[in-house]
Amino acid sequence: MNEMQFLTWVRGPALDIAIGIFLLGVLWRLIEIYSLGRKVDVAPGRHRDGASGLHTVFRRSVPPPGMVKRSPVTYIGGYVFHIGLAIIVFLFEPHIILIRDLTGLSWPGLPSQVIDLVSVITLGAMLVVLADRIKSPVKRYLSTFSDWFTWTLTFLPVLTGWMAVQHLLLPYTTMLALHILSVELLLIVLPFTKLFHAFTVFGSRWYLGKINGHRGVPV
Amino acid sequence: MSASLQKGINALKEVIDAPVASYFNSCVHCGLCAEACLFYLETGDVKYTPIHKLEPLRRVYEQEYTLLGRLGKMVGLSKAVTDDELEEWKELVYDSCTMCGRCSMVCPVGNDIVYMVRKLREGMAVSGHAPDGIKGATKRTVEIGGPMGLKWPAVANVIKKAEAATGVSINVDKPGVDYLVLLSSMEIVNYPEYLEALVKIFKKAGISFTLASDAFEATNAGIQIGASDIAKVIVSRIINSAEKLGVKYVLSPECGHAYMAIRWEGPNLIGRPYKFEVRHVLEVLEELRQKGVLKMKDKFKEPLILHDPCQIVRRGGVLEAPEPLIQTVAENYIPIVDKQKWNWCCGGGGGASAIHTEEAEALRAKAFRIKKRQIEESGVNTMVTFCANCRIVIEEGFDHYEMNTQLLGLTELLAEHLED
Ligand code: SF4
Ligand code: SF4
């Protein structure tokens, strides 16, 4: 298989398979989790403004008082790389074109120099949070193989994408093919690892807000 | 597998629900929950990271309710929870967790960690891995009536004293009144002035109330230990008595765990709402203040801070009553940085104060340093709180560190300065 054939394969059948596993995986995991249900709380609730599931879904995006000072790297590093990833995934022109081809939806993107800068910043932030995971006693203690593995799978697409655009190390076609392949790996693994928090985070915050909101506590 | 372990695992399987599943799947191992837990902060020991305390529950979840976990268990990749492991976790689930709920306030993905600690305790209790101190308290509550083994004559004694001190005769087992007043054993033994204070205030407000000889204990050791069946038996005493007497309200004493038990867990334990309303004493006092009934003849002059008990405020939702009440009676109330729902636990909630092993007591003393710092940083010599359990734990802390801070109960303080 030469470079071109490799690229055609990752773009064609491999992408279909990856997206298929991703979609089925997400659906399966969501059912597996949320079909467990929960008992309704029969204690009469207390109403207080701001105490609800929906409030908490939003409120938890903002650091609680004093927490940034306690763990600055976690918060700042975390924000930077999450926002960076979102910008790269959704506002890079070639990605928008791909999404348009798949779904018919499209929107304006950012100039590629901007994406370039964002990619470098994102890679930097990811390296910082990795160093922090190695260094911080609590994070290291909590970490399992899955934490290192999912970090790698998230890092690779950004790295290979950036390198492809910069024409670094390998010919563009090969690097692009590797980039797409790394995204496919990420898609396949996402539903079955901690990366699935991308979906469950909404449910978790909602339950938290709802359960505590029933007692009138905005959390 | 021992029969008791099997029971424990079954209990865990039963309590796992969609929120638990969602929480475990959301955890990103960021460690931020540790930064909210007094036991981690004051010891620096990583094993006290809140989410780590739930490891046995997480594994049961994974192995029983996820496809990959079931596969992993089949091929031997993930090992089953053992008795030894649960025994090791006893310290993490009881000694070093007061169910204060502060971790649940900070987790960025929204995991309600304390919700899960409560559930894990169900498995710990039936598999026999609860601490002896809490087991004893539970046994005494079931067999005698309260966690400290108190019987009605002790309460009758306190009633007699309160009658002598206030000149008001106190109803016992009287049907048709507004309130059934509950107490906690700790109040009966250590802070009998609480009842006196209440009698004084209720008389002033013209509120009718009674105590019940078959239901005076408000705390619920069954909830602390994590045994819902026992918790149900204990709470039913109050419910039966209150519904038989036909009261409109049941008054929860200051005690925080009592409030959580009777106000929030009780209806779920018996599976229906009550025929009466449960109110925390501070909610009633705040209402009286707003109506203008709670007038003070003078004010407490010394500067003071407030300790908000976790189960009443952060977990119980009595958020807004404490501050206006303290401001009514104190001239020099100083709000601290981490107050109200952000307050730090005294270190002895969730049944922890009933564990009297050397290690547990040493750990409690360490955790108390966070409270000590709060007091020292505010530069006051007086702290006010409204939970009998907090009061005992805090006084132990004062003794341990030889602090000369004075600790006052809010209801008593109000009664003391009440207009005659
Ligand atoms: S704060 Fe939440 S996401 Fe982070 S380690 Fe604790 S439970 Fe997991
Ligand atoms: S509930 Fe309180 S004591 Fe328990 S783990 Fe959370 S922060 Fe720590």
Image (tube, rainbow, N blue to C red):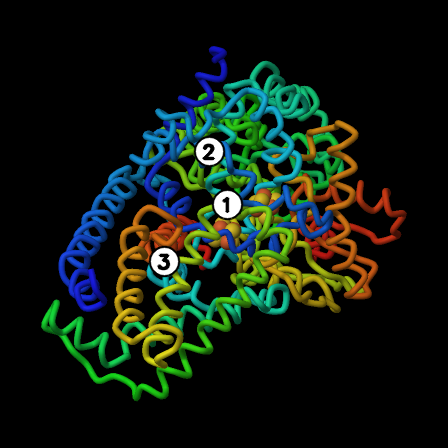
Horizontal arrangement in the rendering, residue A194 relative to residue B382 (left or right): left
The residue wearing badge 1 is A144
Marked residue chain, label 2: B
Identified by mark 3, the residue type is: Ser
Task: Give the SS element for disc 3.
Answer: loop
Residue B122, compared with residue B259, is above or below; it is above
Horizontal arrangement in the rendering, residue B46 relative to residue A198 (left or right): right
Residue B173, compared with residue B370, is above or below; it is above
* Residue at 87% over, 47% down: B401
The residue wearing badge 2 is B57
Crowding at dot 2, Cα within 10 Å, few <14 / some 14-19 / many 20+, comes out as: many
Tags 2 and 3 touching, CB below 8 Å: no
The residue wearing badge 3 is A52
Dots 1 and 3 on the same chain: yes
Considering depth in this image, is B274 or A61 the residue closer to the camera?
A: A61
Extreme-front residue of the structure: A2
Considering depth in this image, is A212 or B177 the residue closer to the camera?
A: A212
Identified by mark 1, the residue type is: Thr
- Spatial CA distance of label 1 from label 2 is 17 Å
Task: Give the SS element for disc 1.
Answer: loop
Mark 1 or mark 2, which is nearer to you?
1
* Residue at 69% over, 30% down: B354
Considering depth in this image, is B191 or A66 the residue closer to the camera?
A: A66
Marked residue chain, label 3: A
Q: Earlier in the sequence, mark 1 or mark 3?
A: 3
Whether residue B268 can be seen here = no
Image position, residue B273 (x, y; %): 35, 36
Res A111 → quadrant: bottom left
Identified by mark 2, the residue type is: Leu
Horizontal arrangement in the rendering, residue B11 relative to residue B313 (left or right): left
Crowding at dot 1, Cα within 10 Å, few <14 / some 14-19 / many 20+, comes out as: few
